[in-house]
Image (spheres, rainbow, N blue to C red):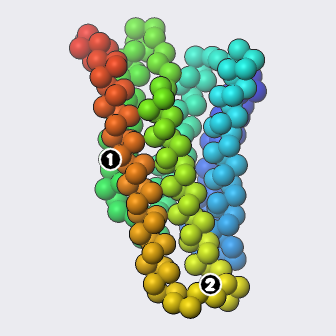
Amino acid sequence: MNLPNKLTMLRLILVPFYVFFLLMPGIPHHYLWALLIFAAASYTDHLDGKIARKYNMITDFGKFADPLADKIMIFAALACFIELNLMSSVVLIITAAREFAVTSVRLAAAGKGEVIAANIWGKLKTVSQMAAVLVVMLLQYLLELNSMGILHFDNAVTVQMWFGIVGQILLWISVFFTIISGINYLACNFQYIKNAK
């Protein structure tokens, strides 16, 4: 297994760790720990692709495993956000529907010996999702610091409301890119759907 693929596997290994910290509010600075681990996992997504392209280490396994690792990473974070009442389940439902549709096309292509790599829209979708998750966790950490008395917001209720609005806007922007990238992916690879048996 080459270095880019090892980084992809590391991204998967990090998932249960940030899920643990996200869902353990009894641990001081739990949002910060979750944020740092998720940021590290997100950086491996940038790094594995960069190394694979620069050193010609692109493999069929990497083309398949890299987007799969992204999906697992994002799904885990969004599921935790629902558990923490930070977002609507609709965001996860739309995201899951897109990913199941795209995965079905990938499997149809794989049956014909083809491996479809992510395009620019898929990358924009992933970047927007990761950015939204990171910002939501950062804003929640600021609120956590306020509740611990480390920060002091004059009107904590108003700040919490605005932080919630910002988080929702970013999550729905990621949903927009999720839908657009899904439509683009299905349109560009329609032949695999049309010729499926």
Check residue 70 in the rendering and tell me which mark sits there, or answer none. Answer: none
Tell me where residue 15 appears, x and y as whole percent. 61, 50
In the image, residue 192 sits, relative to residue 187, either above or below, namely: above
Taking the spot 70% from the left edge, 34% from the top edge, the residue there is: 47
Name the secondary structure under disc 2.
Answer: helix
Quadrant hosting residue 181: top left
Q: How many residues crowd mark 1 within 10 Å: few (<14), some (14–19), many (20+)? A: some
Name the secondary structure under disc 1.
Answer: helix
C-alpha span from label 1 to label 2: 33 Å
In the image, residue 31 sits, relative to residue 91, either above or below, namely: below
Q: Name the one closer to the observer, 3 or 132.
A: 132
Q: Is residue 157 left or right of residue 3?
A: left
In the image, residue 76 sits, relative to residue 32, either above or below, namely: above
Locate the N terminus and report the quarter of the image it occupies.
top right
Taking the spot 69% from the left edge, 58% from the top edge, the residue there is: 36
Taking the spot 44% from the left edge, 71% from the top edge, the residue there is: 164
Q: Is residue 55 left or right of residue 187?
A: right
Mark 1 touches mark 2? (CB < 8 Å)? no
Q: Is residue 121 left or right of residue 156?
A: left
In the image, residue 194 sits, relative to residue 4, either above or below, namely: above
Q: Is residue 181 visible?
A: yes
Identify which amino acid the numbered label 1 is placed on: Ile
Identify which amino acid the numbered label 2 is placed on: Asn
Tell me where residue 139 appears, x and y as whole percent. 56, 69
Q: What residue does disc 1 label?
A: 94
Q: Name the one closer to the observer, 154 or 97.
A: 154
Q: What residue does disc 2 label?
A: 146
Tell me where residue 17 appears, x and y as whole percent. 66, 56
